[in-house]
Amino acid sequence: MGVGARLWRPSCELVGLAPSRGRHAHFRSGLRPVSLGGGSVGSHDFGNGGLVMCRPDDPAWLELVRNSPDATVFHHPAWSSAVQETYGYPAFVLASRMSDGPLMGGIPVIKVSNPVGRRRLIALPFTDHCPPLLADGADPALFVEGMARWQHGHGDRSLEVRAALPAAGAHPQAVGTRHLMALEPDVEGVFRRLHRNRIQKRVRRSREAGVEVTLSRSRDELDVFYRLHCETRRRQGVPVQPRRFFERLWQNVIEPGLGFVITARTAGVPIATALFLRWNRHLIYKYGASDRTRWNLGANFLVHWTAIEWGCANGCTTYDLGRTDAGHESLRAFKAGWGAEEVPLIYTHIGTLAPKLERGLAPVALAHLIRHSPAVVGRVLGEVLYRYAA
């Protein structure tokens, strides 16, 4: 019996799920109109670089998101809706439209603010990588030039794009690395590419130790996920996202079939969990958490491998293990062990210089406070501060 047969069963057998509807999953939009000083978002040309602002659930944008091979779940309006409903930030798509025809290009944008009210435009908050989408035949350079002219026409609002862009006058910034793993239907071939000692053996040992995994989109898994997530964030010394963010994520993204959660248990006790996103052929690891007292069971490895097997079985071609900041060598080594390709992660700032990435005394003191305080402290701080960490 092969690796795939030993370690994976279809998701509907695991928790009674119907197969994912993938790119045709239903989405309930909770997006609201927004004004940026130039009128309400619609299909109106503001005369700034030939680009227009349209709603994230505009049918023409949805068509581009469905048809673009580069689109991920972050381009889907479900992600913008979850962020907007949680923090109240206005969302729109900056797009190139030919008269009343289809969009030739676009990028989702959300307007955020800092504690003193200074506003920024980010494409896209709480994501690692979100480049513009372009239709066949569209000129990438012209679209980026249009973005720069549009930003200039809106004065004091800087625009941060979470991708490398060839824009004149823009300021690129290396913020870390991404790790991308190629997937294919041959799950046995994928398993053979994994590092034998660091990954393969730990996946097998976790199964032999009796660790069981379930893949679910049920709201019932939210409590388990959030409890382990809070414990992990406390251990890391960072604030916890508000619970309502994950509630919106379940409502807009997970339950409609644009993602899922995998939880590992031993003797019925949850010891590791992770949240994954899927759109088109792209599978993304977004959040992970675990019980450090059970790390010896290798449940984290089994969770990732289960997601990879699911991706192989459901037509995914890439597995994105997410951002790694500079200096996190152990995390880089973990991701490299999966046979993932490391690529630079570049953000582009239009209209302002890129901010410095140095770690000052304040974050160090905050991390110390969170690690040595009850878990509720991290949750309270997250409730107050996380909206500014977009």
Image (spheres, rainbow, N blue to C red):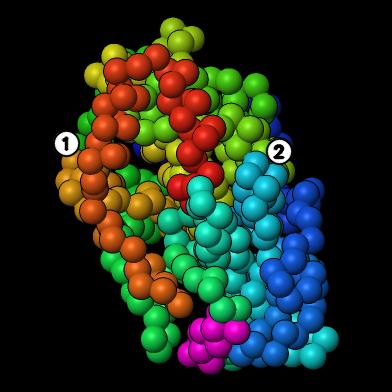
Most frequent secondary structure within the magenta stretch: helix
Q: Which residue is drawn at 60% across and 60% down?
A: 111
Q: Which residue is drawn at 43% across and 21% down?
A: 377
Q: Is mark 2 on a helix, strand or loop?
A: helix
Residues in magenta? 140-153
Q: Which mark is residue 197?
A: 1
The quarter of the picture where residue 298 lies is top left
Q: Earlier in the sequence, mark 1 or mark 2?
A: 1
Q: Which mark is residue 251?
A: 2
- Tell me if residue 196 can be seen: no
Q: Residue furthest front?
A: 116
Q: Residue 85 carries which label?
A: none
Looking at the rendered image, the quarter that the N terminus falls into is: top left
Q: What residue type is labelled 2?
A: Gln
The quarter of the picture where residue 374 lies is top left
Q: Residue furthest right?
A: 100
Locate residue 97, reporting x and y percent. 72, 85
